[in-house]
Amino acid sequence: MDPIIILHAGIATGTVLLFATLGEIFAERSGIMNLGLEGMMLIGAMSAFSITVATGNGLLGIVGAMLAAGALSMLHGVVTIHFQADQVVSGLALTFLGVGLALVFGEGLSKAGTISLLPRLTVPILSPVPVLGPIFFTNQSVLAYVGYMLVPFSWFFINRTRPGMHLRAVGENPSAADAMGINVYRQRYIYVLVGGLLAGLSGATISLAVSPGWFSELTTGGLGWIAVGLVIFAAWNPWRAAFGAYAFGALRRTILDIQGPQLLLGIRNPFFFNPYYGFFLQMLPFVFVIVVLIIASREALRKRIGAPAALGLPYVRGERGL
Amino acid sequence: MTATPSSARRSFRFPLVLQIEPRMDSPRWLALLVSVVAVLLALVMGAVVLALVGGNPFRAYAHIAGAAFGSLGVFSDTLVKATPLIFTGTACAVAFKMKLWNIGAEGQFFMGALGASIVILAGVVSEDASRLVTLAAMVVGGALFGAAWGFIPGILKARLRVNEIITTLMLNYISFALVNYFIFGVWSEGGFQMTRTFQRAAWLPRISDLADQFPIMRGLTTHAGFILAVGVAIIAWYILFRSLWGYEIRLIGDNPRAAKYAGIKITRNTVLILMLSGGIAGLGGMSEIAGVIHRLQGSISPGYGFTGIIIAWLAKLNPLLVIPVSILFGGLILAGREIQPSGIPRLIQGIILFMLIASEVFLRYHIRLVRRPA
């Protein structure tokens, strides 16, 4: 129950959630909600593992995972952007399809072989820093460092660059953006694709860096849906997404560790003496998401921050409304 | 000047173009035709995937047809599989009609099963109570627990605008863990992950119970839950399409702003509809353990709650249409159990849903190939 160890381990699961959440932030900022994260992540995890087993090259696995999930996201793009279908239902369809495809093509993959984890790095100058060094910069997977860099980059891109401004314009007021000469459809396709690529990377992180292997549906085990919730908690802001993702990762690790000691804060640990109470611990991550959403909703009501105004609405040229 | 520069550069132009115009109205036969074609196309695409992974799609589909509708016996089994789907499909249709995305029918189904089990195993009704009393208590328990599981996202949505998609989904996972706690830790029978078998008074009657008088009914497993499911679907249809309350619900779904100006209480209806939806799904869980399994265990559903989403959509959110669609999907699930790889039924469901929502573009637009205007 050492907090440093818990936080260090939390970065791993946190990185999985971070990639998926950042990708979804990009897609939703452009006005397209993609609830298919769970399916895209599972496809990503399956592709990454099978390609890496076959070629021995983790980088190829990551690229394959991103392309597979990206291709899936384009299906959602066509249906919601051009065909103006309901984004919720299309996202659910994508979940079914992604999970189904991953199970079909992942048949027998759990016994296909073993892979070595992606390399882990310790940063020379930063690792001796007290507290932060051992948590963030010691013996973390290369993908964790990709995550660290992606957060400030995403924030800067969305809030401080011209393409980022176009992205926000398309999500807040597509008809005004269209009048400005921005191609709304193209923008939305691009960011739905970005969301898909990052969901694939997120899946690859699971099967190449966190728990190597293929455990069918349990590989993601609901993390995709948790990422959808984190987007709302993050209020579509990459920094808050990072905070939420890592905090959530640490919580998962705490739940694992809490069943270990006989004494907890000086009292008999109920989770040690009655293993069945572990089922209540299993609920905690999901309860946590609901609590976090309640907090985020109260804050949104008070500060009047909210979802991109055109989120979930198809854009049709020449029709009234957003 | 007869030839503009652009037409001079491009000497050949494809003589036909797609002309896309918004439709003012879409006839009923077109909606039906488009849905049927979408499902058929989805089955073809499923066959392609099946062939890609080395299966024989023709044999697989022939197997599904034979194993689901081939004889009175298997059709009876198909109805057994259709029963929970009618409940979950109706539950989803009711909520979706108000544009409330209840993705939690699976969890509400489990909670309904838990509620019905508590009635039996916690001694709410005594073991020698009559069948009618026992079953009635189970119906109440199942519906109450399902409704409670719908109340949570309902009140959060109504009071705090918490996104109900996420909360209903999270509650699914919570309900699985809760049911697991009871079957592993409280009611475990001899170390197995299931409760004891319920007393006979807690079993829904089956057709085969009449086999003594009518030998033809021997082995027919269809149980009274099917009648309950059809009844619930009809009542839900009546509420949605024939009652004032249903009119309010549909108005909120179609145009919440107009509903607000008309003085309809959106917050109260949000809670009520999610409770109704959860209660119906909960009844499904009760019917499944009282009619088929006769005990509580972990594997009571291969995803009935999620398939209910697709069924509701395929039925155009009409509870009456949910019944035949559920019977078709019941056949798919029954026969699909033996199809390998195991992801195939889910995959086909995903393709069907995708094709359905993509095909709706044909209902909104006139899409024609026309001669390019000169």
Image (tube, grey):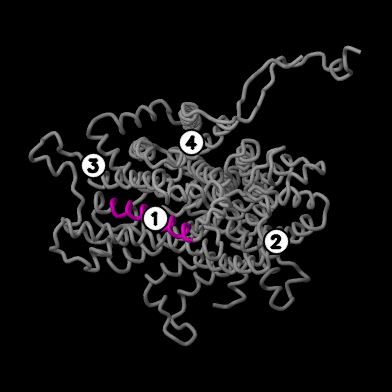
From the image, tell me which residue sits under label 2. Answer: A237
Where is residue A67? Give x, y as percent: 65, 42
Mark 1 touching mark 2, by CB under 8 A?
A: no
* Secondary structure beneath label 3: loop
Question: For the residue marked with disc 4, what is the amino acid?
Answer: Ile
Question: For the residue marked with disc 2, what is the amino acid?
Answer: Asn
Q: Is disc 3 on the same chain as disc 1?
A: yes
- First in sequence: mark 1 vs mark 3: 3
Q: Is residue B313 left or right of residue A233?
A: left
Tell me the number on the disc at residue B222.
Answer: 3
* Secondary structure beneath label 4: helix
Q: Is disc 2 on the same chain as disc 4?
A: no
Query: Badge 1, how many Cα within 10 Å: few under 14, some, many 20+?
Result: many
For marks 1 and 2, give the one nearer the viewer: 1
Q: Which subunit holds the residue at mark 1?
A: B
Mark 4 touching mark 1, by CB under 8 A?
A: no
Q: Which subunit holds the residue at mark 2?
A: A
Q: Is residue A13 magenta?
A: no
Question: For the residue marked with disc 1, what is the amino acid?
Answer: Leu
Region of the chain picked out in magenta, as a range:
B268-288
Q: Is residue B221 above or below residue A142?
A: above
The Cα–Cα distance between marks 3 and 2, rounded to whole angstroms, is: 53 Å
Q: Kindly identify the residue that appears in the image at 49 percent across and 60 percent down.
A: B170
Tell me the number on the disc at residue B276.
Answer: 1
Tell me the number on the disc at residue B352.
Answer: 4
Q: Which subunit holds the residue at mark 3?
A: B
The Cα–Cα distance between marks 4 and 1, rounded to whole angstroms, is: 27 Å
Mark 4 touching mark 2, by CB under 8 A?
A: no
